[in-house]
Image (cartoon, helix red, strand yellow):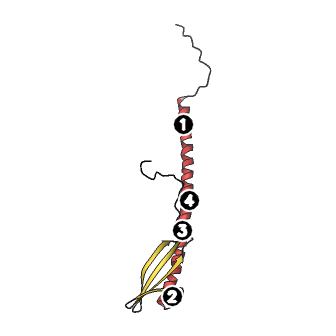
């Protein structure tokens, strides 16, 4: 019994372990690229959020200073609005950024100052986005 060896065809011999390793490296490369993109967008969002928060707290600080002045009977920079019974109403605004402002309304009755409104108001002009040609309805 003489076993003859069959000649193997010449070509690229890649084992299944090599194919699995190549697939794993490809998957890890794609996942690392996606992770990097996600981290970058999270960083940008955190920077924007910090900037907006800092601007709000700066405006809040200025509004609080004006409130303290009003409590000490200094009404400079404050607009007198209404007068009902024994209550006077005053208001003022402090800009947060080019699109928002802090709107404050105070009431003073019998020497006590009370905050009626302390609210963020949009101050920018809203313009609708007309780039999409939407269906207006009807049978046409």
Is residue 68 positioned above or below 20 on the image? below
Of pointers 3 and 4, the one earlier in the residue sequence: 4
Secondary structure state at the residue bearing disc 4: helix
- Which circle, 4 or 1, is nearer the viewer? 4
Disc nearer the start of the sequence (1/2): 1
Q: Which residue is mark 1?
A: 23
> Counting residues from the N terminus, which is met first, the one under dot 2 or under dot 4?
4
N-terminal label among 2 and 3: 2
Task: Give the residue at x 54% y 53%.
Answer: 38
Whether pointer 3 and pointer 1 mark residues with C-beta atoms closer than 8 Å, the reply is no
Between 91 and 138, the one nearer to me in the picture: 138
Mark 3 or 1: the one toward you: 3
Residue to which mark 2 is pinned: 69
Q: CA distance from mark 2 to mark 4?
A: 39 Å
Q: Is residue 125 left or right of residue 119?
A: right
Is the residue under label 1 in contact with that under label 4 (CB below 8 Å)? Answer: no
Q: Is residue 33 left or right of residue 113?
A: right
Does the residue at mark 2 contact the one at mark 3 (Cβ under 8 Å)? no
Residue behind mark 3: 125
Q: Is residue 23 left or right of residue 86?
A: right
* Of marks 2 and 4, the one in the foreground: 2
Q: Could you give the CA–CA distance between mark 4 and mark 1, rounded to whole angstroms? A: 30 Å
Circle 1: is it few (<14), some (14-19), or many (20+) Cα within 10 Å?
A: few
**Who comes first in sequence, dot 3 or dot 1?**
1
Where's residue 97, x and y in %? 56, 71
């Amino acid at each position: 019994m003489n076993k003859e060896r069959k000649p193997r065809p010449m070509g690229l011999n890649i084992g299944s372990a090599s194919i699995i390793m190549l697939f794993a490296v490809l998957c890890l490369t794609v996942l690392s690229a996606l992770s990097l993109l996600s981290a970058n967008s999270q960083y940008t969002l955190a920077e924007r959020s910090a900037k907006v928060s800092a601007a709000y707290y700066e405006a809040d600080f200025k509004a609080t200073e004006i409130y303290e002045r009003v409590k000490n009977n200094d009404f400079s920079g404050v607009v007198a609005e209404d007068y009902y019974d024994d209550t006077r109403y005053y208001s003022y605004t402090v800009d947060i950024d080019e699109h928002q402002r802090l709107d404050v309304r105070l009431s003073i009755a019998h020497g006590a100052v009370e905050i009626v409104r302390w609210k963020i108001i949009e101050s920018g002009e809203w313009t609708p986005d007309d780039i999409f040609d939407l269906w207006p309805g009807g049978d046409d």
